[in-house]
Amino acid sequence: MRLFAQILGRIERLADVEGSGMRWDRVCQLFGLAGVAFFLVTAFSPLAHLWDLWTAVRPQFVPSDAIVVLAHGVSPFGILYPESALPTNRAIALYQEGLAPLLVFLGGAPEGGGTPEAEARAQLARLLGIPPEAILTETRPHTTRDEAALVKLLLQSREVRTILLVSDSGHLMRAQPLFERAGFAVHPAPSDALSDPDAPEDRLALMRGILKELLARLYYRAAGYI
Amino acid sequence: MKAILILALPGLTFVGAFFFGVRRLRLSGRSLGAAIGKTLESVGTTLVFLAINVAVAVIIHLDGARLNGNLCVSLHR
């Protein structure tokens, strides 16, 4: 107990930077004030939506060799989550518009087993009239980096050069350079609606997604992946 | 409307509690500033520790990935 008090005292002395007039508790108060202000502004203003619009990837719906749909998640019962169903539907629509002859669905099985996301997406596409020979699935990737590497292996023999990459806008900002590094000419096809949420909890959820993706991009950059 | 309600409810509770404390419980109104300062300090400390935790996790993970080639556990999808 005494040792603990000594350590605390030492930390306090270290944090009290002499001459600077700035103490640890003041610094923490400033961070706290900034955090609370950011929370309130996010919840009660359209900041998250404006940020989302500002960083959104512009779609390039141009004819390509394949449409690649990135993974998002599936329930243990094989039901696609909304974040997964949205890009799947977008990709099917792009195929039906004749923008590419090949659909590549990505996504593994949920934790604890079950139908892989890619298979659930392929089932949906077949139900909507896409010929089975136009559908490829890859169920192994765990990360966006894995997805780029495995799609490269999958499409190498088919001489695919240009792809329409389908995911939400934030994810595409990180995925696009990865797929370009893998040797593809990438045309982003964002699938999110970029709507302005009204409820504070929805705005906070949107900001959480933006910050999560921002951190992921920083992490990928620090790791040298992009 | 919902946003106004969410803001108004804790705001009014705060004001009510302040007056109750000052008038009925004879507490010092000035000590509220110090209490808010301590609350902000707690929030700030939490944020600082969160940032340090994330930074340490990234460094450990990047070092692990360099040593191991590719870690089984990914820090991010």
Image (cartoon, rainbow, N blue to C red):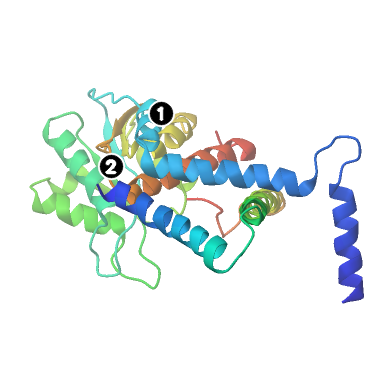
Residue A191 image point, x, y percent: 26, 38
Alpha-carbon span between mark 1 and mark 2: 17 Å
Q: Secondary structure at mark 1?
A: helix
Residue A198 image point, x, y percent: 27, 43
Q: Nearer the viewer, mark 1 or mark 2?
A: 2
Local crowd at mark 2 within 10 Å, few (<14), some, or many (≥20)? Answer: some
Q: Quadrant of the N terminus of chain A?
A: bottom right
Viewer-proximal residue among A74 and A169: A169
In which quadrant of the rendered view does residue A152 lie? top left
At x 39% / y 26%, what residue is drawn? Answer: A54
In which quadrant of the rendered view does residue A69 lie? top left
Of labels 1 and 2, earlier in sequence is 1
Residue A147 in view: no
Instruction: Identify the chain of the residue marked 1, using the numbered disc in the image.
Output: A
Residue A10 in view: yes
Instruction: Identify the chain of the residue marked 2, using the numbered disc in the image.
Output: A
Question: Hey, what amino acid is under mark 2?
Answer: Pro
Which label belongs to residue A197?
2
At x 59% / y 35%, what residue is drawn? Answer: A221
Q: Is residue B64 left or right of residue A62?
A: right
The residue tagged 1 is A55
Question: Hey, what amino acid is under mark 1?
Answer: Thr
